Image: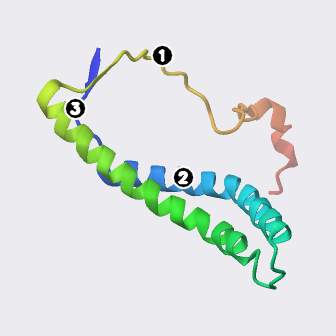
């Protein structure tokens, strides 16, 4: 059994920020659609009625990324604090045997007999 006693706060914050920014990108089209429907459903026909949805959809990935970064940093700090008090996560890891693999196929060098007779050399 292995115990995770502490985590890198900045590494968690960066990963969480990127994950939440990607979620913001995935959810942005829905906010564009809601903004479009809101502009069509309004009683007043102003040219900027649907701009809120467009602006929100453009800033949404950045906003979600910042919130994810902050949540990851706070979560990492809290984990480190609580892990000191009550212990960390227990992990059971399986170790696989090392397998030697070459980055390219290993081809044996040609033998001297396969190179031909020595009389081909000038001299």
Q: Which residue is mark 2?
A: 20
Placement of the N terminus among the 4 image quadrants: top left
Dot 1 alpha-carbon crowd within 10 angstroms: few under 14, some 14 to 19, many 20 or more: few
Query: Do tag 1 and tag 2 residues touch (Cβ < 8 Å)?
Result: no
Q: Earlier in the sequence, mark 3 or mark 2?
A: 3
Q: Nearer the viewer, residue 112 or 37?
A: 37
Q: Which residue is mark 1?
A: 97
The residue at the point 76 percent across, 59 percent down is 29
Q: Quadrant of residue 36?
A: bottom right
The residue at the point 71 percent across, 60 percent down is 31
Dot 2 alpha-carbon crowd within 10 angstroms: few under 14, some 14 to 19, many 20 or more: many
Asked if residue 78 is positioned above or below residue 93 in the image, the reply reads below
Q: Earlier in the sequence, mark 1 or mark 2?
A: 2
Dot 3 alpha-carbon crowd within 10 angstroms: few under 14, some 14 to 19, many 20 or more: some
What is the tally of numbered marks visible in this picture?
3
Which element is circle 3 on? loop
Asked if residue 25 is positioned above or below residue 94 in the image, the reply reads below
The residue at the point 72 percent across, 72 percent down is 54
Instruction: Return the mark for residue 28.
Output: none
Q: Quadrant of residue 78?
A: top left
Q: Which residue is mark 3?
A: 5
Task: Give the Cα distance between marks 3 and 2.
Answer: 25 Å
The answer to whether residue 9 shows anywhere in this view is yes
């Amino acid at each position: 059994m292995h115990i995770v006693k502490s985590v890198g706060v900045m590494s968690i914050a960066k990963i969480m920020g990127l994950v939440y920014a990607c979620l913001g990108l995935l959810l942005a089209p829905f906010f564009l659609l809601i903004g479009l429907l809101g502009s069509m459903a309004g009683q007043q026909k102003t040219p900027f009625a649907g701009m809120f949805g467009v602006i929100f959809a453009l800033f949404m990935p950045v906003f979600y990324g910042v919130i994810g970064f902050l949540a990851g940093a706070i979560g990492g700090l809290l984990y480190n604090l609580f892990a000191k008090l009550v212990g960390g996560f227990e992990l059971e890891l399986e170790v696989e045997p090392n397998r030697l693999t070459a980055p390219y196929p290993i081809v044996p060098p040609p033998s001297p007999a396969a190179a031909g007779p020595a009389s081909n050399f000038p001299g």
